[in-house]
Image (spheres, rainbow, N blue to C red):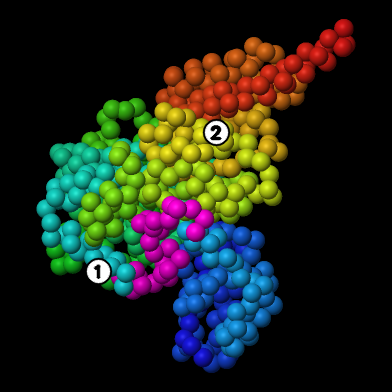
Amino acid sequence: MKSMTILFSTDSNSLLNGSRSYAQTMKDLVKEYNLSKMVDVVETGTFGFYGKGVLFQVFPEDIYYSVSSVDDLKEIFNEHVLKGRIVSKFLVEKEKIKPAKRTELKETRIVLRNAGIIDPENIEEYIARDGYKALYNVLRMKQMDVIEMIKASGLRGRGGAGFPTGLKWEMTFKAKDGKKYVLCNADEGEPGTFKDRLILEGDPHSVIEAMAIAGYSIGADTGYIYIRGEYYNSIKKVQKAINDAKEYGLLGNNIFGSDFSFDIAIRPGAGSYVVGDETALMESLEGKAGRPRLKPPYPTEHGLYGKPTLINNVETFANVPWIILNGPGAFRRYGTEKSKGTKVFSLVGNVVNRGIVELPMGCTLRELIYGFGGGVAKGRTLKMVQTGGTAGTFVKPDKLDLPIDYESIKDGISLGSGSILVIDDQNKAIDIAKKAVKFYMHESCGKCTPCREGTRDLYILLDRISKGIGKKEDIERIRTLSMEISDSSFCGLGQSINLPLVSLYDNFKDEFLELVKAKSKNTSNLI
């Protein structure tokens, strides 16, 4: 019998299917048959693909099984583990997990380089893959030299705004104040987006290491990770990683024997889309309601507790150690002229293979949906795609071959958080519009009148139209009102409502008009 490693994904999505229970059952079987020296059962991060059952990998054969019962698992154990026979009926095609053959564009893992490979709760496995080597190197560099590396890489914020990361670091470094903070935004309130959660659950040390690097670069000794309160598994794994890093001397005082000290604490959020705004996040951290502040001053000068503060999101930070170890030139080889590196996308909706995938900037919707997502579910026809999350735009299939990057908004494609919502022809534009506006209405913090009252008025208009009692002028009012809310709202929540609504209006105006015409016909019959 050959030695083997069996890897079970135990991220939040997999846990819902019972992956940890299956992993424990496999461990019990291995122990029962006295195979502990030959078979290693490991819990790891996401493989990127989610089907109906629990997915696990057998290495070194590099094959994947999906099981839906303990009996399935025992059959695989008896046939494959004990006898070396592959059980074909439980096999998952490798192309669903690593679908390089479906498209010329191959998945490029920088952010997800360790997900599905290491045990995220074992710091030694992270260290074995050059973990904390970037921090070690950085502590022997000048602060501004580190910042120049990040600037030269072309890395931009992966939270949606796309602000140059190195420039933000430089602004915070130059702020004249003794106390500074590093914040990681892990709230991830965007519907259909779950990539930050899976990054934290699959490779938490990459974010911790990056925050320490940022702390050294700007002159901060304190960091906070603001995690969505419902992300129980993320909080558990990140706290374990922080504790282990402290135990190994990689956080705390005099890291690697240097004069640099840095510590990190977790702060769970109470659940608010608005805290995606960095000033609202800081308000929440200070114990106040998560409502945005007036800018300027910007957080780099006047942030948490009035001190200079650097805020990046999970995905942005996860790029940093790789850039330090491989150089800014290696990072710039991926992506487009103005959008360098890779992007992690969440594939959701009416798509065959839901999950996450990391591709170079400039990939297309067609490559994402058909190359990696396996196409539209149940063989149905693609009607539209929402790009960038709820605050993103809706596009028709005629834009599937346009590149996706920070500049693609000029073509109506929003990069945003990287959520790609596939919508088939069974869905109606009016229903989608109502759901989007209902979300905005619910998540409005109420601070400003245009957003607080305007979202409610928009929903009333859409609801009337959906019920067949709307008027033609209601349709025109939807477009103008959404633009008015966008132009006059205080923060990004209200300012972005025009993106989904105007794109729906422009692309599917005929559907809205048909509802009004149907109402007119019914009225004339009554007369």
Residue at the image point whose x is 17% and y is 38% from the top: 175
Q: Position of residue 264 (x, y in %)?
A: 31, 56
Q: Nearer the viewer, mark 2 or mark 1?
A: 2
Q: Which residue is mark 2?
A: 398
Residue at the image point whose x is 55% and y is 70% from the top: 64
| Residue 19 visible in this rendered orientation of the protein | no
| Residue 142 visible in this rendered orientation of the protein | yes
In the displayed image of the protein, which residue is found farthest to the right? 526
Is the residue 223 above or below the residue 470 in the image? below
Is the residue 465 above or below the residue 128 in the image? above
Secondary structure, magenta segment, majority class: loop
Q: Which residue is mark 1?
A: 249
Secondary element under disc 2, as helix, strand or loop, is: helix
Is the residue 331 above or below the residue 96 in the image? above
Q: Position of residue 193 (x, y in %)?
A: 50, 46
Alpha carbon of mark 2 to alpha carbon of mark 1: how far? 54 Å
Q: Is residue 256 magenta?
A: no
- On the rendered structure, is 312 left or right of 496? left
Location of the C terminus (image quadrant): top right
Callout 2: few (<14), some (14-19), or many (20+) C-alpha neighbours within 10 Å?
few
For residue 363, what is the image quadrant? top left
Q: Position of residue 130 (x, y in %)?
A: 28, 68
- Say what amino acid the circle numbered 1 marks: Gly
Q: Which residues are magenta?
A: 101-127
